[in-house]
Amino acid sequence: MNYPRNGSLSRRQFHHVVAGATGGLLATTAIAADGAGVAGAIRGEPTAEKVGLQMLAAGGNAIDAIVAAALTAAVVVPHQTGIGGYGGAVTLAVDGGRRITSIDFNTMAPAAMKPDIFPVDVTGKAIGDKHRVGWLAAGVPGILAGLQLALEKYGTKSFREVVQPAIALARDGFPLDNGAGIALQGTAKLLAADPGSQALYFRDGKPLKAGDRYSNPGLAGLLEQLAKDNSVQSFYRGDIGKQIAAAFAKNGGLLTADDMAAYRAREVEPLTMNWGDRTVHTAPLVAGGATIIEALLLLKDLKWADRDPNDFDAVNLQIEALRYAWQDRLELFGDPQHAEVPLQRLLDSSTIRSAAAKIQKAVTAKQPLPVRVMSRPDNGTINLSAVDKSGSMAALTLTHGDSFGAKITVPGLGLTLGHGMSRFDPNPKHPNAPGPHKQPLHNMCPTLVSQNGRARCAVGARGGRKIPNAVFEVVLQLIARDKGLPEAVAAPRMHTEGLLAVAFEKTWPAELVEAMKHRGYTVTTAASATVSAAGLASSGEPIAAMR
């Protein structure tokens, strides 16, 4: 089906798109179980995948597909993300995969945000929950700005076209999936305390359950206005932005109409590193890609690829490279536009060489490196990865943060807001402390791998702090073990955040896990983040994988 460029879809077309999104696809859209179609591939969320494949089948490129899919996901998984989510990042390849760039659309703190706004106790933990729940927890939502920038610069369809399936789903409704139902039950008390959220997610005083039909007419109306304008400008610098700011003012929040108007998504240069004939390109700070690059550089210096994959020391080196990179992340990273972040020094070859020597010494002695800084947990998010038959591709991650973000909804707009301010460190002296118009550090790290100057695959993940490690693990399999995309995604993963705790997936050999216990780690069994990836097979055919 061809989408009109100069007007909204008809009611009949609305239902045709929704039928494809929630049931079967158009007959002309060939789709495999792995999310691949004849025109490309996309993985990340079932309904969003179908909408993205329809966009590819209608002649759109990978960027059109992933933006349409992201707008759809922002409706159908309201616990994970939404257009009021705090933000995200995308790394994309255009010109047939020859040019790679990133777009940062992370949230921005209000101008009135102060470094000591969230008081801490003697352990450094924020007192109360105001950084996570309520109107102080939210900043400017960056998602719409990022999606429009990607579409305007690198897509072929208009915003009016790609938003139509999301409008239809929000207006006409759909059954909530199990994830949303479970999240609603778990957050019901907090959501019930907010009138806007209660009106949206409750019926007869009780939270919706999995299978209940959910619609969001307020959000549909908002999106229809943006479709009519063929632009998201009014969300930031028009009546919608003013309505959002008024809700903050009424509820004791800090965000103003001026903050909304000041927001801009930014195209940024990806962080890169080479490994043989492969190059890794990932979203830069304040995204999580720097941690991936640092850990990969450490393993490259340690000649990790030359080791037997089943060798205990090889796994131990992997753990320590991640631990070392995470300790730097927790101690030194923040918004480089507002804080001194020594990233260039950390990634310098001499620094990497010195750190790699320390890691090798610790592994030889079978003793972990000492812990430098402590950690605190995060959760959330959705990731989409797409490729088209020309070789253009993208990995795009967007989030509320935790389930339903700040647990607040702007009345009349159906706009649930993410809790981006929770991603700051409440210690006012930390590089990642809150501050006026600062962006918080986050875990999203959409990443592309190229080979001989052409993008080969796009990789991203959802799962809070597990995201950087999961993407790292898949990329490591691709570049160091030369595995294909499905095999790299299927390979077992581990997780650590710099402390002595290491979580292995249950598919790791028992004797290896036991050996790590004897080497001083606190070992558990736990699932990794969910990775979604898309790329081109050696034959040139689009492929996708998710686990």
Image (tube, helix red, strand yellow):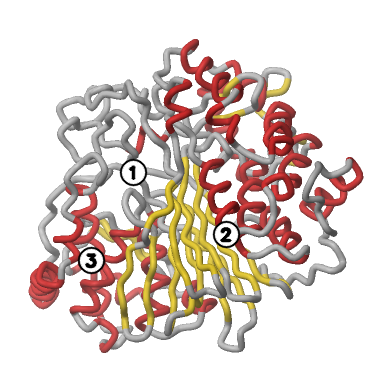
Which is more N-terminal, label 2 or label 3?
2
- 334 on left or right of 14: left
Furthest toward the top, the residue is 250
Q: Looking at numbered disc 2 in the image, what kind of residue is underneath it?
A: Tyr
Quadrant for the N terminus, please: bottom right
Q: Are marks 3 and 2 in contact (CB under 8 Å)?
A: no
- Front label number (3 vs 2): 2
Disc 2, SS: helix
The residue that mark 2 highlights is 154
Q: Please identify the quarter of the rendering in which residue 492 is found.
A: bottom left
The residue that mark 1 highlights is 377
Which mark, residue 517?
3
Q: Nearer the viewer, residue 167 or 462?
A: 167
Q: Nearer the viewer, residue 445 or 472?
A: 445
Q: Position of residue 161 (x, y in %)?
A: 74, 49
Which is more N-terminal, label 1 or label 3?
1
Residue 366 appears in view: no
Q: Position of residue 500 (x, y in %)?
A: 21, 57
Q: Looking at numbered disc 3 in the image, what kind of residue is underneath it?
A: Lys
Furthest toward the right, the residue is 12
